[in-house]
Image: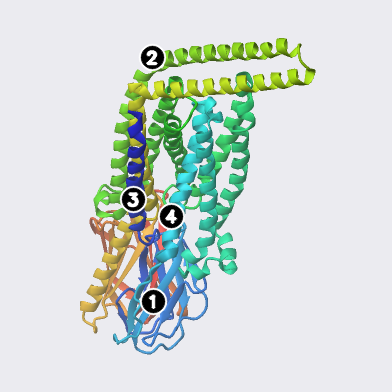
């Protein structure tokens, strides 16, 4: 029975690695985790007067470099001047040369989102009338190519290393303390530490090129490396390396001094190792939480500790599963049924924590049920949920095998230990008899011959004893493998590990995908901007009707949305104004208060307040809005979504 297991294991592992490789290879460039939700001038719009600056609004704060925002004329020459700056909130602007000629201009941007992922794109607008342009790159791709693939591989290895390191050490301390002396388990945990360390160094080197040029030649650019060290992600990676140094000391004690202690001394040392290991493990998990999804967006203060718990639960379950698999297949030291029972309870608690934290993270990243099917993040999340369900189903059968294992395993171990003890006693008697016989003969010969006979007899006895121990060990292993309950447990644990490898690959791809909530917000903003642009293009130019679209976020419940301000005919004198408020998914909704103010900064006029009347759901209107003179007016809209949640957003527009 046992002779057929190894080929099956090898075949299964090859299939698993192939699936994992396809998942990682098909991941493609990292999706933008900060989405462009607005721009001024807007995409595709034709303006009569050349703007003095270009501003972009993102769904979250981003990091900029000197070349993050560029504006190119029809010939491809840059017309932006100065460095891009943060105008307000999540809006960033770059000034332009004065007196731009008529034609089509291309705006390109390449920034890094607050959750550490590169974001790039481009769009066009025209001054006077559209024209031909020599700019062919209407969009930029970042996070792809060889560097992007290596970066994705590094992320996978870092997750895998963390899970094996933390989960394996937890399994030894909490479930199977005798495992500290098992060589296969030692090699597993040490390999987890090495994988995490090497992957962290790789990510640190690749980071600069990954977020900028994407060139392999820039991987060892010290200037880029210095810039990375000043970022949030760079600080997280360096912190991880420092914590790994402490983890190395922990592993050395666990498999060194701890293994050599007696049972009573082990109990005293276990508490200290558990506390130290928990601190180091939580610190390692925090290096992901402080630099990725959890560190930005809704309820970041709650999301980061929840993310730490989520990662620790995953490590305790899947990493412990790997350690159990190694103990069942590779270890010469038989694992007790009680240790398997303890891991079963640990795994159950980890799954409960995993589900609780996963539900919260799903709500935070998706925001709506439709995002499960309408966004790539939601689709990947459904795949992850399905894999977790399969894993839990297999674990159910593992628990059944564990329950049936106790009686047979205890009896077999007791019998084996008694046989081993008898063998050792026989070996001792053989040693004594064979050692004594030469002494009688030696008394009749010289002292030197007697000494040589004693040494030869002792060596022979020791050799026989070692052979008997080896035979006893082999018999123990055969008896253990012949146990149908243990054999069933080995197969179910192997199946769990196989699904876990694929699950980790899906999770790695998921962390590189734009969250569903952000993707839906971006779609709504683009749809609103497109409709506004179409409305403006279709209106009578002599009438001069004006439509401004602005996303907003008050920070509270139902605080996100998109508002549109229509001013007709947008000229000096009386105007009719309409304000529309929509959710990110495009549905109209009401808010407690909407106020509008007009300011002509150049002439120090205003703000001129306007309080529109509520007409219907998501619609406010005001007649007779007076504009005293023509100019570049600032239109500011204050939106209040609750008693305490309020925000003011604004845009400039030529009126009159």
Sequence-first tag of 3 and 4: 3
Local packing at callout 2 (Cα closer than 10 Å; few below 14, some 14-19, many 20+) is few
Q: Nearer the viewer, residue 87 or 645?
A: 87
390 to 35, vertically: above or below: above
Rounded to the nearest angstrom, the CA distance separating label 2 from label 1 is: 72 Å
| Quadrant assignment, res 577 | bottom left
Q: Which residue is mark 1?
A: 107
377 left or right, relative to 170: left
Rounded to the nearest angstrom, the CA distance separating label 3 from label 4 is: 14 Å
| Rendered image: mark on residue 562 | none
Local packing at callout 4 (Cα closer than 10 Å; few below 14, some 14-19, many 20+) is many
Rounded to the nearest angstrom, the CA distance separating label 1 from label 4 is: 32 Å
Rounded to the nearest angstrom, the CA distance separating label 1 from label 3 is: 41 Å
Q: Are marks 2 and 1 in contact (CB under 8 Å)?
A: no
Q: Which residue is mark 2?
A: 407
Q: Position of residue 238 (x, y in %)?
A: 58, 53
């Amino acid at each position: 029975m046992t002779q057929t297991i190894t080929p099956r294991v090898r075949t299964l592992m090859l299939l698993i690695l192939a699936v994992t490789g396809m998942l990682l290879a098909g991941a493609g460039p990292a999706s933008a985790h900060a989405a462009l939700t607005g721009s001024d001038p807007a995409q595709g719009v034709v303006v009569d007067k050349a703007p003095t600056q270009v501003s972009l609004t993102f769904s979250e704060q981003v990091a900029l470099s000197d070349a993050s925002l560029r504006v190119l004329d029809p010939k491809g020459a840059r017309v932006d001047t100065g460095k891009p700056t943060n105008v307000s909130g999540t809006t960033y602007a770059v000034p332009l040369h004065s007196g731009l000629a008529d034609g089509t201009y291309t705006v390109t941007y390449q920034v890094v989102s607050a959750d550490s992922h590169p974001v790039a794109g481009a769009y066009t607008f025209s001054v006077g009338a559209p024209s031909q342009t020599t700019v062919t790159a209407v969009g930029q791709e970042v996070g792809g190519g060889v560097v992007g693939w290596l970066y994705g591989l590094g992320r996978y290895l870092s997750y895998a290393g963390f899970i094996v390191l933390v989960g394996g050490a937890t399994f030894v301390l909490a479930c199977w303390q005798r495992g500290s002396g098992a060589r296969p388990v030692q090699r597993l945990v040490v390999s987890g530490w090495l994988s995490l360390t090497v992957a962290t160094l790789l990510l640190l080197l690749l980071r600069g090129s990954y977020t900028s040029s994407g060139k392999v030649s820039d991987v060892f650019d010290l200037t880029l490396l210095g810039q990375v060290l000043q970022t949030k992600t760079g600080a997280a990676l360096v912190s991880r390396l420092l914590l790994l140094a402490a983890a190395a000391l922990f592993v050395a004690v666990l498999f060194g001094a701890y293994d050599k202690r007696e049972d009573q001394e082990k109990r005293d040392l276990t508490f200290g190792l558990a506390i130290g290991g928990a601190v180091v493990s939580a610190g390692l998990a925090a290096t992901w939480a402080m630099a990725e999804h959890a560190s930005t967006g809704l309820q970041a203060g709650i999301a980061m500790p929840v993310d730490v718990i989520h990662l620790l639960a995953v490590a305790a379950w899947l990493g412990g599963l790997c350690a159990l698999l190694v103990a069942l297949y590779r270890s010469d030291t038989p694992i007790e049924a009680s240790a398997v029972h303890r891991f079963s309870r640990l795994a159950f608690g980890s799954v409960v924590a995993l589900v609780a934290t996963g539900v919260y993270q799903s709500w935070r990243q998706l925001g709506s049920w439709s995002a499960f099917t309408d966004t790539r993040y939601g689709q990947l999340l459904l795949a992850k949920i399905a894999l977790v369900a399969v894993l839990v189903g297999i674990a159910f059968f593992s628990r059944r095998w564990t329950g049936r294992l106790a009686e047979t395993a205890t009896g077999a171990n007791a019998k084996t230990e008694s046989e081993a003890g008898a063998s050792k006693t026989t070996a001792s008697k053989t040693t004594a008899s064979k050692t004594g016989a030469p002494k009688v003969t030696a008394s009749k010969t010289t002292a030197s011959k007697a000494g040589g006979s004693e040494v030869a007899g002792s060596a022979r006895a020791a050799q026989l004893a070692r052979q008997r121990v080896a035979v006893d060990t082999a018999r123990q292993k055969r008896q253990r493998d012949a146990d149908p309950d243990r054999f069933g447990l080995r197969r179910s644990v192997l199946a769990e590990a196989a699904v876990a490898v694929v699950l980790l690959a899906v999770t790695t791809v998921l962390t590189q995908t734009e969250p569903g909530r952000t993707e839906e917000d971006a779609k709504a903003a683009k749809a609103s901007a497109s409709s506004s642009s179409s409305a403006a293009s279709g209106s009578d130019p002599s009438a001069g009707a004006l439509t401004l679209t602005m996303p907003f976020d008050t920070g509270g419940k139902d605080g996100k949305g998109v508002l549109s301000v229509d001013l007709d005919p947008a000229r000096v004198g009386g105007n009719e104004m309409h304000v529309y408020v929509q959710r990110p998914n495009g549905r109209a909704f009401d808010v407690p208060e909407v106020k509008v103010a007009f300011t002509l900064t150049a002439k120090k006029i205003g703000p001129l307040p306007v309080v529109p009347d509520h007409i219907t759901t998501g619609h406010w209107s005001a007649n007779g809005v007076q504009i005293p003179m023509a100019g570049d007016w600032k239109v500011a809209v204050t939106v209040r979504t609750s008693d305490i949640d309020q925000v003011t957003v604004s845009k400039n527009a030529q009126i009159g």
